[in-house]
Amino acid sequence: MISQKFFVVLLHWEFIYMATAFDMAYPVTPWKVKLSCIPPNTTYDFLFPTGISENSSSLNGHYEAVDEDKFNINTTYFSNLSSKTSSYCCFWSEQDKNCSIYANNTEGNASVSTVNASVFQQIGANWNIQCWMKGDLKLLICQMESLFNNTFKNYEFKAHLSYILSEDLEDSSLVSQIGSFQSVQCTCTVNECCECHIPVPTAKLSSTLLMHLEIASGGVIFQSPLISVQPINVVKPDPPLVLHVEITDSGELKISWSSPTLLPFQLQYQVKYSENSTTKVAETALATSLLVDNVLPGSLYEVQVRSKRLDGPGIWSDWSAPYIFTTQDVIYFPPKILTTVGSNVSFQCVYKNENKVVPAEKIVWWMNLAEKIPQSQYNVMSDHVSKVTLHNVNATIPRGKFTYNAVYCCNERECHHRYAELYVLDVNIKISCETDGYLSKMTCRWSTNTMPSLVGSTLQLRYRRRGLYCFNSPSIHPISEPKDCHLKSDGFYECVFQPIFLLSGYTMWIRINHALGSLDSPPACFTPESVVKPLPPSSVKAEITVNVGLLKISWEKPALPENDLQFQIRYGLSGKEVQWKIYEVYDAKSKSCSLAVSDLCAVYAAQVRCKRLDGLGYWSDWSDLAYTVVMDVKVPARGPEFWRRISEDPTKKQRNVTLLWKPLMKHDSLCSVRRYVVEHHTSPNGTWSEDVGNYTESTFPWTEQTHTVTVLAINSIGASSVNSNLTFSWAMGEVNIVQSLSAYTLNSSCAVLSWMLSPSHYNLMYLIIEWKNLNEDNEMKWIRIPSSVKKYYIHDQFIPIEKYEFSLYPVFVEGVGKPKIINSFTQDDIEKHENNAGLYVIVPIIISSSVLLLGTLLISHQRMKKLFWEDVPNPKNCSWAQGINFQKRTDIL
């Protein structure tokens, strides 16, 4: 401990001497310097200038006397140093091998002699010294390597370094700063190497660092002159990182790397690479990559990179760790291409087969090993580089897990298993946008269902907004913004722009990002004001107008947008599946419309939607459904059709007439019947009415010669406007115009009646057919038919073994005529139909039998010819048969 304190005091004392005696320091360059010292008590075989201490010896002429005023030497401290056990030391370098020696003369003055460094190398102790800043700019390191060639190398080796960061270089005296110097212990190894660490604040990287070394070995203290250095000028960066080698799309070898740390200056780089053991070094400037031409297949590349400050002094970093890269026997460039439908793409390759590079003109190209690419699409780029161009490519059709086309580069006889990959996508993605009815946001949607997914790709909507409206032909701008879109359950992506500028043009497209590159869909431009989807009309009502009988639909226009709107109405009969009909309204001021419908008594559903009248934008959603309410809209269109049933009352000797009618259907009653009224007209008693309510029959006594009745249907609006009359007349009951009546059955559910009428001068209005089953107590059934009909099909249940009664009544304006009544189906008609049915069976049988007989005769004829003429010789082969007419005999057969 005492020895260490003594050493520090001695170090400071020696430094005071140096500072005051020389007032100068040796600048450290970024390269290595050497420190050489002559040990004390050494016999010097050289001469110093006159007056130098006699202990000095000659330097064999390798010196130069220097005036002390040149260095402003202070002799006081120099003479004090002579009494200590010390040595003469100096710095020199490979570039400047002159070394300056400081010594006392006999008068106590200092002098400087310049000696060639080779003298020190022969008789002194020598060190290699290098100082540098670490790449993190926090620590300055000084490293010493001993070059001892004498007995000092056998002794313990220790070193100290004293330093101070000085910001005022104009101060000629350093004595006042002696107390500010700091000392650090250097770490030394058995190999006589020492390393000293000095922390440097970031703010003082450009300050001057003054320091000197104190080296103790074998009881001798070697003290260096002052060293001056600016830390920023001796930075040694860390080696570059993330070294990577690849073959570019143009077939070059690309060596790339990353800067190790962020430094306050730019770096230059040096690349060392070997190709099959042939080493080359190439320097680059600011770029962090290097391209190497003439890459050969099947070659081994070893690459290293180091860096250094570009625009000032500095130290090369250590070389990075070696990166090994081996090229394949077949090199494709580019190895993969991502493109769009309709593009032209090119691949190049170099093929090495059996350690020989295949000439370019002998290379052939295949697609998926199934289709040979025509030779007209080949190009010879160099002796060994072949190029193929594919024109107007189609979209790739995925085949299982393969989502690309394989392009093979082959020689004339075989193909290598390696191939290039071609990805062709159809990026015609349609984007649609719509602005909401409140004009507050614009929602854009797009889908990729038509495009096969590409593994590793991402989709992004990008857009650019310009001042007003859209160009006629939108284009992709280099400056754009991304927009977040979210996938919905229907498979569409949805993006929302809010707030929006109604008159600005939003140009947008879909970008497909992939490691192979990016593709853009065709751009589309939207102006929010032009893609508005209005809110649906409100207050929609539907009703059937009273007395007019039209379907009236009314609505209220939405408040926004303020543009003129057109409207579209759809309506139909209400039900599970409405069969909609569409009606257009182009009058922007209209708020209702009236439509003719077929059934005024049905429930109709109606909806309304709207859109800008100029055609821009979208139809709104349909409004809520509005329904009509069934109610009476007109008086009944007509009264009911009715008939009568007459019964005799022997006790009272009168006839009772019961009127019968069927309830009116909705389309006749428009739309309901509240009650029926029977009006009676007789000659002597006049007219009276009878309200029968909702009943469908009414009975009254027939006591007059002529009695006319009318049945009216009444709803909430009034009585039916068209009604039929029926007149009962005793005299007309004897008028007989029905000459004949026949009936026959077609099947169990249909019977046919036909009749003949004779002319009459009375006004025939219509006919009434009655029928009933005589074997049952069923009520009589009736139907009213026009007077012009001569045959009528009755659809009912008819059993052939039962008897039915059919009656035909002519009804005149003057009254009901005499009926024609039959009690059974006409027998002649039944037999005729039965005969006809037998005929339908027999005729097909006769036709089939005839065809069969004709076929049998033809076959028999052929067999007879063969039987009788089998032995007839050929006239061409027999001389005796020539001239005989065999055809004549054949004709006989």
Image (cartoon, rainbow, N blue to C red):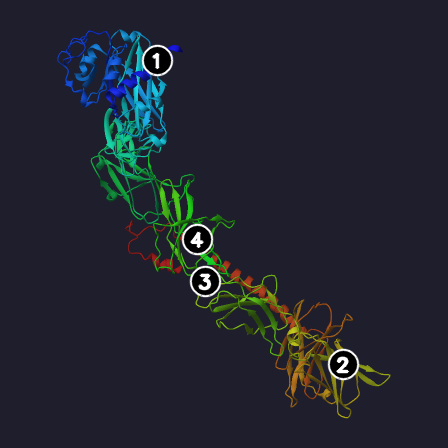
Residue 766 found in image quarter: bottom right
CA distance separating discs 4 and 2: 94 Å
Q: Nearer the viewer, mark 2 or mark 1?
A: 1
Name the front one of labels 3 and 4.
3
Instruction: Give the CA distance from mark 3 to mark 4.
Output: 87 Å
Q: Crowding at label 3, few (<14), some or many (≥20) Cα neighbours within 10 Å?
A: many
10 Å crowding of disc 4: few (<14), some (14-19), many (20+): few
Q: CA distance from mark 2 to mark 1?
A: 145 Å
SS at badge 4: helix
Amino acid of disc 4:
Arg
Q: Is residue 248 visible?
A: yes
Label 1: how many Cα within 10 Å (few below 14, some 14–19, many 20+): some
Image quarter of the C terminus: bottom left
Q: Looking at numbered disc 2 in the image, what kind of residue is underneath it? A: Asp
Q: Nearer the viewer, residue 791 or 14?
A: 14
- Which residue lies under the disc numbered 2? 691
Q: Judging from the image, what secondary structure is the residue with disc 2 in?
A: strand
Of callouts 3 and 2, the N-terminal one: 3
**Mark closest to the chain's N terminus, 2 or 1:** 1
Query: Can you give x and y, in whole percent of width and height, for residue 559 in the image?
Result: 52, 66
Query: x%, y% of residue 627?
Result: 61, 67
Task: Check the image and report above or below for 254 versus 424.
Answer: above
Report whether 496 appears left or right of 515: right
Question: Can you tell which mark lies on residue 727?
Answer: none
Image coordinates for residue 536, horizontal then vertical, percent: 54, 64
Residue position for label 4: 863
Amino acid type indicated by mark 1: Phe
* Residue 354 in view of the camera: no
Q: Identify the residue position indicated by label 3 in the image.
A: 617
* Left or right: where 621 falls relative to 337: right
Q: Earlier in the sequence, mark 1 or mark 3?
A: 1
- Give the labeled residue for mark 1: 7
